[in-house]
Amino acid sequence: MPSSIATTHFSDPHCPWAYSASPALSVLHWRFGDQLDWRHVMIGLAEGPERYVAAGYTPTRSAQSFRTFERRFGMPFGGQPRERVTGTGLACRVVVAARLAQPEAELAVFRALQFAQFTTTLLLDREDDLRAALAPVAGQVDVDAVVGALDDPAVEAAYQQDRAEARTAAGRPIEAQGREADTDGAVRYTAPSIIFATEDGRSLEVGGFQPLESYDTALANLDVSLERRPAAGDVVDVLRALPYAPVTREVAACMTTNLGELDHDAAEQALIAAAGEGLVRREAIGSGALWHLTR
């Protein structure tokens, strides 16, 4: 049995590049399963909106750019501009609060915040809107407890530790590739960045937004004994294997063979057929859908 690979994932629920990388990350979950031991580190891109506003970001400009991301990478987005630009600090703290209180729900909380950021007009720097964003995962996490812990010193300390770890990219491979950022005085990892590490101390990092092949190549070079699940042939198998309800693009990515062309429409047709058989349920989200197992 191959050893597990420690997988450190630097991200932020407000980053459209991280959100657009979701299909590749879903393939990692599908292909390698629990051989990858995931740890999530919140970057904390911006405590408040000031930096974004100073750089010329507006709600309309953001909504327009989301459509470009959707056309390029296939994740669902919304089209209505927000009331105002927001920072990312509170949303990141919510993820950390979930990690401390209910670690098994951390990824569900992170994804719920991503979907809220990119398919709704909720303002994720307001506690009421954060509660609304987490409503879809209320069965997995105590929403009031998690949001109520935002002022907990333990949550703040853990969040600041995440931020500090994310700002250790100076001199690392990500900087050599020019995929790092320095927006607040320290060279940091951009979202998403992943460091894979073996039990004997070897590691490789895939910094910033990169194609699936970058992750796959890094893992093959670290451990040739990793068991690889081939491309899926059945959409229901994908839903059973992933640790969360996927969107159509994520399912399509898991069904794509090496050097094959991703077929979003074929995956959607197969998912609709499975829904017709009562095997899955479609949940509309932004311009697309989440797919849930029913049995």
Image (cartoon, rainbow, N blue to C red):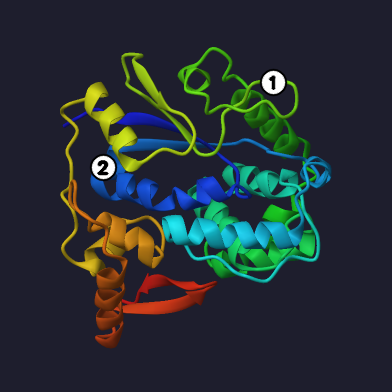
Residue picked out by circle 1: 186
- Other-residue count near label 2 (Cα within 10 Å), few / some / many at <14 / 14–19 / ≥20: some
Occupied quadrant, residue 93: top right
At 62% from the left and 28% from the top, the residue drawn is 181
Q: Secondary structure at mark 1?
A: loop
| Vertical order, 37 against 149 (above or below) | above
Q: Position of residue 127 (x, y in %)?
A: 78, 59
- Give the residue type at disc 1: Ala
At 32% from the left and 19% from the top, the residue drawn is 199
- Other-residue count near label 1 (Cα within 10 Å), few / some / many at <14 / 14–19 / ≥20: some
Spatial CA distance of label 2 from label 1 is: 33 Å
At 74% from the left and 21% from the top, the residue drawn is 185
Occupied quadrant, residue 109: bottom right
**199 sits left or right of 135 in the view:** left
At 60% from the left and 43% from the top, the residue drawn is 12
Q: Which sits in the foreground, 61 or 173?
A: 61
In the rendered structure, find residue 160 and report the number of the disc placed on it.
Answer: none
Residue picked out by circle 2: 32
Q: Secondary structure at mark 2?
A: helix
Q: Is there CB contact under 8 Å for labels 2 and 1? A: no
Q: Which is nearer the N-term, disc 2 or disc 1? A: 2
**194 sits left or right of 228 in the view:** right
